Image: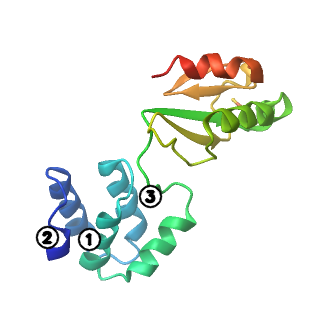
Amino acid sequence: MCVECKDLVDPKEEKLDELIARYKSQKGAMIPVLQQAQEIYGYLPEQVLRHISKEMKIPIAKVYGVVTFYAQFRLTPMGRNVISTCLGTACHVRGGAKVLDTIENELKVKDGETTEDGRYSLEIVNCIGACGLAPVISVNGEVHGRLTPEQIPGILAQYE
Ligand code: FES
């Protein structure tokens, strides 16, 4: 463990070091390392990125370049409730954008963001396999379908 990374917390730290050791000598391993580090921490804290940069000898600017380029990477923790709003074709055609607008206005967050109180994270997805119920959202994997914008406040209130 590098000196400036000493405050990483066990046992996640141990898993991160195992992960880095596994990939260290492989070329092009940065993305799988970042993906798995995100699985360990739930997001990619700055100190984790610095640790990966140092141990894998990849400049920190390059690590940040990759993390900010791909939408799959998160630099902030997920909220307690994850709202996936579908904008796939069926949902889009049936008013998914209005549902999304309403959620964004209610929570004051955009795609990929978490509310300040940590209660909700919002993400846009392309299809969750419930097209017959379009437009749909899922909250923590629970699907809500045939939505109108007016239903959104009541649905959000169900999740503390
Ligand atoms: S397009 Fe929204 S669930 Fe399939």
Report whether the residue tagged 3 is closer than 8 Å to ligand 1. Answer: no
| Residue at x 52%, y 41% (from the top left corner) | 115
x, y percent for residue 145: 69, 18
Q: In this view, does 145 lie above or below 9?
A: above
x, y percent for residue 35: 40, 57
Indicate the colouring scheme.
Answer: rainbow
Residue 36 relative to residue 152: left or right: left
Q: Earlier in the sequence, mark 3 or mark 1?
A: 1
Residue 14 relative to residue 47: left or right: left
| Residue at x 85%, y 32% (from the top left corner) | 93
Report which residue position mark 3 lands on.
75
Instruction: Report the front residue among 100 and 130.
Output: 100
Residue farthest toward the right in the current orientation of the protein = 93
Q: Earlier in the sequence, mark 3 or mark 2?
A: 2
**Which residue type carries mark 2?**
Met
Report whether the residue tagged 2 is closer than 8 Å to ligand 1. Answer: no
**Which residue type carries mark 3?**
Leu
Q: Which quarter of the image is occupied by the C terminus?
A: top left
Residue 84 relative to residue 21: left or right: right
Mark 1, other Cα within 10 Å: few <14 / some 14–19 / many ≥20: many
Classify mark 1: helix, strand or loop: helix
Instruction: Report the front residue among 63 and 32.
Output: 63
x, y percent for residue 80: 42, 33
Q: How far apart are marks 3 and 1 (CA)?
A: 15 Å
Report which residue position mark 2 lands on.
1
Q: Distance between the residues labelled 2 and 1?
A: 8 Å
Report which residue position mark 1 lands on.
51
**Which residue type carries mark 1?**
His
Question: Mark 3 or mark 1: which is in front?
Answer: 3
Classify mark 3: helix, strand or loop: loop
CB atoms of marks 2 and 1 within 8 Å: yes
